[in-house]
Amino acid sequence: MVDVVSDAIAAVRVGRPSSDRVRVGGRWCARLAPYEGAGFHVVLGGSCWLLPDGGEPVALGAGDVVLLPHGTGHVIADAPADAETVARAVPFERWADGSLPRRPRTHAGTREVEMLCGKYRLDRSHAHPLLTELPPLVHLPARAGAHPELRAAIGLLEGELDERRPGASLALPSLLDLLFVYMIRSWAAESTAGAWPAALGDPVTAAALRALHSDPAAPWTVDRLAAEAGVSRPTLARRFTALVGRPPMAYLTWWRLTRAAALLRDTGDPLATVARHVGYASPYALSHAFRREFGTTPGRYRNGC
């Protein structure tokens, strides 16, 4: 699963993730506008509420993790809020820099909330279907024994944020990337609906996907892929197509071209090098397939990025 998840993220990720560690008490209400990317919140201590645009309020407690994979606008607040209060929510940027107005609560038991809030910039124009299938909001409540890798990543992030050790400028973005992988992996492990959790949970389809993602430039055929998965050609074709939504070789073509687009966007490699990396015999062959898939030439695509 990890190869597919990592590749799906790498194909659309742009730049470095950003994060803020924020602490607030009393009465507060902050808005995060819709954005091109994915957002997340990790409640390190205390409790609060998340109110997604057009969705139901979600209560969050210490240890809870929320991923908003499609950049949905939302409000975070100390308590469920009516429409008038939400309309007056302070922009998150003011909250993060400590300028949010605070009013004392009128009842006892007030606790501060401490959160790690962040964003990932994503290029959604060629998103992997695994990411497009994610729901608007993924809530991963803290439960004893659940998602140990995710919990470990959160613990490492807390340590880096607290101590600012040497190398933190490199460690923090890497840990945030790891957090993204673990959030999606946790969703896939828990989800009971959707094609991709089923595809990643099916041993035959998962084996074929791992093979294609580990070496997309290899001269794959359905027969060779079936041998890799340990099943007959008809069995692989039937199960893969049913779960992934396209036949194995059609998926391979799409993935090769998606990888080519990412390489054109993120590197200065010559077209011949890109073609070789993704399994095309020549720049001409890649250009022909690329134009058919994306409606433009590789050169124009690279210049427009």
Image (cartoon, rainbow, N blue to C red):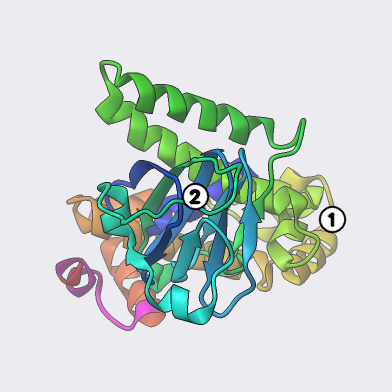
Q: In this view, does 91 lie to the left or right of 142?
A: left
Query: Which residue is labeled 1 in the image?
Result: 232
Residue at (80, 47) in percent of width and height: 203
Q: How many labels does the image show?
A: 2
| Residue lying at the far left of the rendered structure | 303
SS majority, magenta: helix
Q: Secondary structure under badge 2?
A: strand
Span colored in magenta: 294-303
Residue at figure coordinates x 57%, y 40% from the top left: 46
Q: Residue at x 42, y 63 (%)?
A: 258
Disc 1 marks a residue whose amino acid type is: Ser
- Point out the tag, 2 or 1, that comes first from the N-terminus: 2
Pointer 1: residues within 10 angstroms few (<14), some, or many (20+)? few
* Helix, strand or loop at mark 1: loop
Q: Is residue 127 visible?
A: no
Location of residue 107 with respect to 255 vertically, above or below? above
Instruction: Give the quarter of the image for residue 87.
Output: bottom left
State the quadrant of the C terminus. bottom left
- Write down the residue under mark 2: 41
Q: Residue at x 83, y 65 (%)?
A: 234
| Type of amino acid under label 2 | His
Q: Where residue 158 sits in the image (x, y, percent)? A: 45, 28
Q: Position of residue 93 (x, y in %)?
A: 27, 57
Q: Where 185 falls versus 59 (above or below)?
A: above
Left or right: 168 as drawn, with respect to 51: left
